[in-house]
Image (cartoon, rainbow, N blue to C red):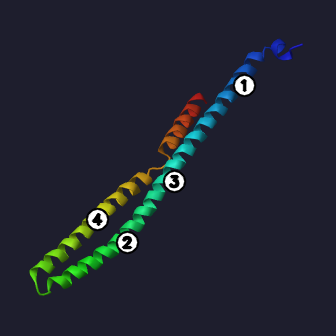
Amino acid sequence: MNWLALLGLESLVNRWRASIIEGAIAVEDRMELARLEWQDQKRRLQQLLVLTVLVGGLTVVALIMLSLAVVVHFWDTPQRTLVGWLVAAVWTLGWVAALASLVAVAQRASDGFALTRRELKQDWQEIKERL
């Protein structure tokens, strides 16, 4: 004998069961989204670390080359001066490019898990509306 059907609670139980299943599927989707965003965030952080080391190394090299260019500037011939400044300029351009890449990756890394936060916020709004 089906007591739930006799008491008229079968439809209520079925709705609760459907809601629980839907909630479990939503949690799985959100966890998958968070996992994907974590992989993306981890990749950005690795890029940030590599570019930070690159910028640090290029800064040292750029300062050495700039110092060398100043020394060469006061040397005997004008050709040495031109070459010294060109080498320093090339290293400085490399440093500027690496710094620009570092800043771009750092800005993208600061916005981690945006999709997960948006989905959770939307879910919370829907829950509040239902209550």
**Mark 3 or mark 1, whichever is nearer to me:** 3
- Amino acid type, label 3: Lys
- Amino acid type, label 1: Arg
Q: Cα distance, mark 3 to mark 1?
A: 37 Å
Check the image and report above or below for 128 versus 53.
above
Residue where numbered disc 3 is placed: 42
- Amino acid type, label 2: Gly
Residue 34: mark in rendering: none
State the residue at coordinates (40%, 57%): 106
Disc with the residue nearer the chain's start (3 vs 2): 3
Q: Cα distance, mark 1 to mark 2?
A: 60 Å
Q: Quadrant of residue 20?
A: top right
Residue 92, horizontal then vertical, whole percent: 25, 69
Q: Would you call the spot at circle 1 few (<14 residues within 10 Å), some (14-19), or many (20 or more)?
A: few
**Mark 1 or mark 4, whichever is nearer to me:** 4
**Mark 3 or mark 2, whichever is nearer to me:** 2
State the residue at coordinates (70%, 21%): 15
State the residue at coordinates (59%, 33%): 127
Residue 17: mark in rendering: 1
> How many marks overall?
4
Residue 57: mark in rendering: 2
- Image-based side of 11 in relation to 3, left or right: left
**Quadrant in the picture for the C terminus:** top right
